[in-house]
Image (cartoon, helix red, strand yellow):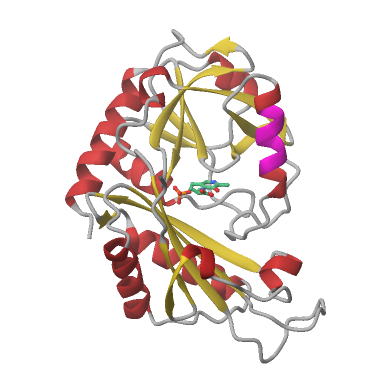
């Protein structure tokens, strides 16, 4: 039997089935909404500061008011973990511009809608860590401001469905001959000479919080890092490939377009980075 979650909606704590928002909400009508996903391990928040900072950046890019102060937002994160007795999983947070009569121009007086809910999930003991995941290359047909974490996720859903149809777990998206990122994670490879290659930050990709920490850990561990775009062919010829995200941490990719990556099993660099990531982020969880 599934336990009814308590969700947060605009200042109220409500059983999930009773939470309601307007059909005029611009998140629903225009995807005029942003979100964050923060992992929870042992009842504590992983990389909270990074997610909070990116949330603020998203609101600024879209001139969207943030309904809570940074202190209040952290308190709500902690309270939702407590109310749902969440040990391991994630917190999903969404802010939309709120409800207003349908108009392409931003409304002047709408009150933003703030929603948080939890999802229990085995983040550390993910069974895919042992096998790695498979990916299929797909064209990146998303909008051009992927640095803003909006809820416009239909194309990533389509790409993921197409990947599933092809027998893969996820899609890696390709634009102008280079990999941008995965449908909901950052994409990385390790070349045969042991260099971690990852695309530079721009409007073409989300500025992954896990990506930034993983690059930092790699540099501190003496792993060479080359920040540049890479092609699907380079990925297929790589020694290792992996994704990073709040919910996968560092997760190996062992098959691309049906071909094994390297030896076809999770490699040592991604295994080491996952270990370093978990150790450091558990120690600094709040
Ligand atoms: N997705 N790129 C995209 C397109 C993403 O959607 C995500 C995260 C990432 C990784 O970012 P971070 O390391 O900050 O989680 C990269 C979340 C987990 C999601 O949509 O569920």
Relative image position of residue 269 (x, y in whole percent)? 33, 24
At 53% across and 62% down in the image, what residue appears?
35
- Note whether residue 83 is visible: yes
Query: For the magenta stretch, what is the residue range?
Result: 157-163
At 31% across and 25% down in the image, what residue appears?
271
Q: Quadrant of residue 157?
A: top right
Q: Can you say which quadrant of the picture contains the N terminus? A: top left
Relative to 50, say whether 115 is above or below: below
- Note whether residue 220 is visible: no
Residue placed farthest to the front in the image? 1
Relative to 204, say whether 93 is above or below: below
Residue placed farthest to the right in the image? 103
Q: Is residue 278 left or right of residue 11?
A: left
Relative image position of residue 131 (x, y in whole percent)? 41, 18
At 75% across and 68% down in the image, what residue appears?
29
Relative image position of residue 140 (x, y in whole percent)? 72, 39
Relative to 263, say whether 65 is above or below: below
Residue placed farthest to the left in the image? 283
Predominant secondary structure, magenta span? helix
Q: Quadrant of residue 258?
A: top right
Is residue 209 shown in magenta? no
Relative image position of residue 56 (x, y in whole percent)? 48, 71
Q: Quadrant of residue 28?
A: bottom right
Q: Can you say which quadrant of the picture contains the C terminus? A: bottom left
Residue placed farthest to the top in the image? 263
Q: How many numbered markers are drawn?
A: 0
């Amino acid at each position: 039997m599934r336990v009814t979650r308590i969700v947060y909606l605009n200042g109220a704590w409500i059983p999930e089935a009773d939470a309601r928002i307007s059909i005029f909400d611009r998140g629903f009508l225009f995807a005029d909404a942003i979100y964050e996903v923060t992992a929870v391990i042992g009842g504590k928040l992983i990389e909270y500061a990074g997610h909070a900072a990116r949330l603020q950046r998203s609101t600024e890019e879209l001139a969207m008011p943030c309904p809570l102060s940074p202190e209040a937002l952290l308190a709500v994160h902690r309270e939702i973990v407590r109310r749902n007795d969440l040990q391991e999983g994630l917190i999903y947070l969404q802010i939309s511009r709120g409800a207003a009569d349908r108009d392409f121009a931003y409304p002047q007086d709408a009150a933003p809608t703030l929603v948080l809910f939890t999802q229990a999930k085995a983040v550390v003991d993910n069974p895919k860590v042992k096998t790695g995941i498979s990916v299929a290359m797909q064209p990146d047909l998303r909008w051009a401001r992927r640095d803003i974490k909006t809820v416009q996720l239909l194309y990533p859903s389509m790409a993921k469905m197409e990947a599933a149809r092809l027998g893969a777990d996820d899609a890696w998206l390709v634009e102008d001959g280079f990999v941008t990122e995965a449908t909901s994670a950052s994409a990385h490879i390790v070349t045969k000479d042991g260099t971690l290659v990852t695309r530079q930050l721009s409007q073409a990709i989300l500025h992954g919080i896990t990506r930034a920490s993983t690059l930092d850990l790699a540099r501190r561990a003496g792993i060479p890092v080359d920040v540049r775009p890479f092609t699907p062919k380079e990925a297929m010829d790589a020694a290792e490939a992996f994704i990073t995200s709040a919910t996968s941490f560092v997760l190996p990719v062992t098959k691309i377009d049906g071909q094994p990556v390297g030896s076809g099993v999770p490699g040592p660099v991604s295994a080491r980075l996952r270990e370093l990531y978990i150790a450091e982020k558990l120690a600094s969880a709040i």
